[in-house]
Amino acid sequence: MSIFGKIKDAIFGKKAQAAEPAAPATPAAGSVGAALDAATSAMASAAAAPAPISEVDVEAILSAEAANAGQPLNWRTSIVDLMKLLGIDPSLDNRKALAQELGYTGELNGSAEMNIWLHKAVMRELAANGGRVPADLTD
């Protein structure tokens, strides 16, 4: 799995996955009443199926995680602290891989420039994938 995929999964969790609808029962052959019952049941199941979550409050989730982290982590500006908060190894190798995934064109040397770009790019990608991210974290 990609580094960004791990970040997204850690924030969005299982909420981002749509629930699988149950398979409708198969009616007995030749039974019109059973066929109508099955069709009605299938329509009711489709209507009752949970809608996929379209937006996840990234700031609220990360703030709650930070409050329980047991150490001060500045996830709002630091890609290293963000990765630590999510339980993802923030090593230079992982940050290089993340930079390549997200299209960074500068030197992959762990510089402040690279890390700042990475943080903004991750926040923009989270927003593009259904996360509600404050504008000051994506600019």
Image: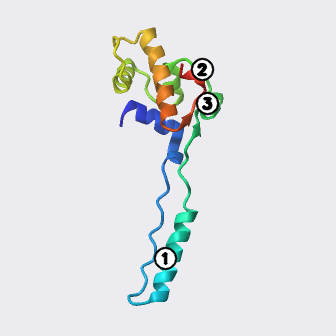
Who's the residue at 49% across and 88% down the image?
33
User: What element does badge 3 sit on?
Assistant: helix
Q: Which residue is mark 1?
A: 39
Quadrant where the C terminus is found in the figure = top right
Alpha carbons under labels 1 and 3: distance apart: 43 Å
Q: Amino acid at mark 1?
A: Ala
From the top left corner, tell me how far across and down residue 119 is, in percent: 49, 21
Q: Viewer-nearest of labels 3 and 2?
A: 2
Instruction: Decide which of tag 2 and tag 1 comes sooner along the chain.
Output: 1
User: What element does badge 2 sit on?
Assistant: helix
Who's the residue at 55% across and 44% down the image?
54
**Vertical side of 15 occupied by 115: above or below:** above
Q: Amino acid at mark 2?
A: Asp
Instruction: Decide which of tag 3 and tag 2 comes sooner along the chain.
Output: 3
**Vertical side of 34 occupied by 63: above or below:** above
User: What element does badge 1 sit on?
Assistant: helix
**Vertical side of 4 occupied by 73: above or below:** above
Q: Amino acid at mark 3?
A: Glu
Tell me whether the residue at label 3 lies in contact with that at label 2, contact meaning CB atoms closer than 8 angstroms. no
Instruction: Decide which of tag 1 and tag 3 comes sooner along the chain.
Output: 1
Who's the residue at 61% across and 35% down the image?
61
From the top left corner, tell me how far across and down residue 115 is, in percent: 45, 15
How packed mark 3 is, by other alpha carbons closer than 10 Å (few <14, some 14-19, many 20 or more), is some
Alpha carbons under labels 3 and 2: distance apart: 11 Å
How packed mark 2 is, by other alpha carbons closer than 10 Å (few <14, some 14-19, many 20 or more), is few
Question: Which numbered disc covers residue 136?
Answer: 2
Q: Which residue is mark 3?
A: 59
From the top left corner, tell me how far across and down residue 123 is, in percent: 51, 26
